[in-house]
Image: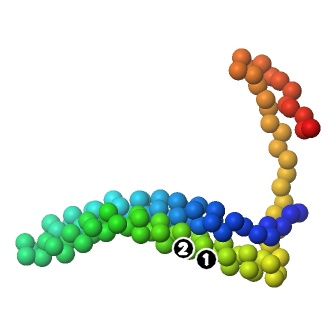
Amino acid sequence: MVQLKKVGVLSVAKVMALIYGAVGIVMVPVLLIVGATFMAAVPNGQKALGSIFLVQAMVFPFLYAGLGFLAGLLGGWLYNLIAGKVGGIEMEFSPVTLAVTSPLGVAMEPPTAV
């Protein structure tokens, strides 16, 4: 059993930004559909309200990625603080044997550790 005692706060923040940004991109079609439906359903004088959804569709992925970065910074910092006091997350790893083949498809011995 090994223990994860500390995480790289900036690396957690970058990964979280990418994850949250991807979720934001997934939300773009939803916002576009809602905006288009709203604009089709309201009278001509209130069409500007529907354009709010279109603007959100353009801004949302970047905003969400930024918030994910901040959440990753805070989460990584908190993890390091708490893991320093009570211990980290315990994990168990098992070795995996990889089959090594040459470019010609011939099986080869795996390299030995030096």
Mark 2 — residue? Answer: 70
Which structural element holds mark 2?
helix
The residue at the far left in this view is 44
Instruction: Report the disc number at residue 74.
Output: 1
Type of the residue with mark 1: Leu
Image position of 62 (left or right of 42): right
Q: Residues within 10 Å of mark 1 (few under 14, many from 20)?
A: some
Q: Which part of the image, by quadrant, shows the N terminus? A: bottom right
Nearer to me, 93 or 111: 111
In-image side of 94 versus 9 (left or right): right
* Residue sticking out furthest to the right: 114
On the question of residue 42 being in view, the answer is no
Q: Helix, strand, or loop for circle 1?
A: helix
Residue drawn at point x = 35 percent, y = 61 percent: 28
As measured in the structure, the alpha-carbon distance from the residue carrying label 2 to the one carrying label 1 is 6 Å
Task: Find residue 37 and report its horizontal and vertical position in percent.
Answer: 21, 66
Q: Residue at x 71, y 17 (%)?
A: 104
Left or right: 6 in relation to 40: right
Percent from the top left, x then y, of residue 20?
50, 65
Q: Position of residue 39 (x, y in %)?
A: 17, 68
Q: How is the image coloured?
A: rainbow
Q: Residue at x 79, y 29 (%)?
A: 100
The amino acid type found where label 2 is placed reads: Leu
The residue under the point 54% across, 73% down is 70
Circles 2 and 1: CB atoms closer than 8 Å: yes
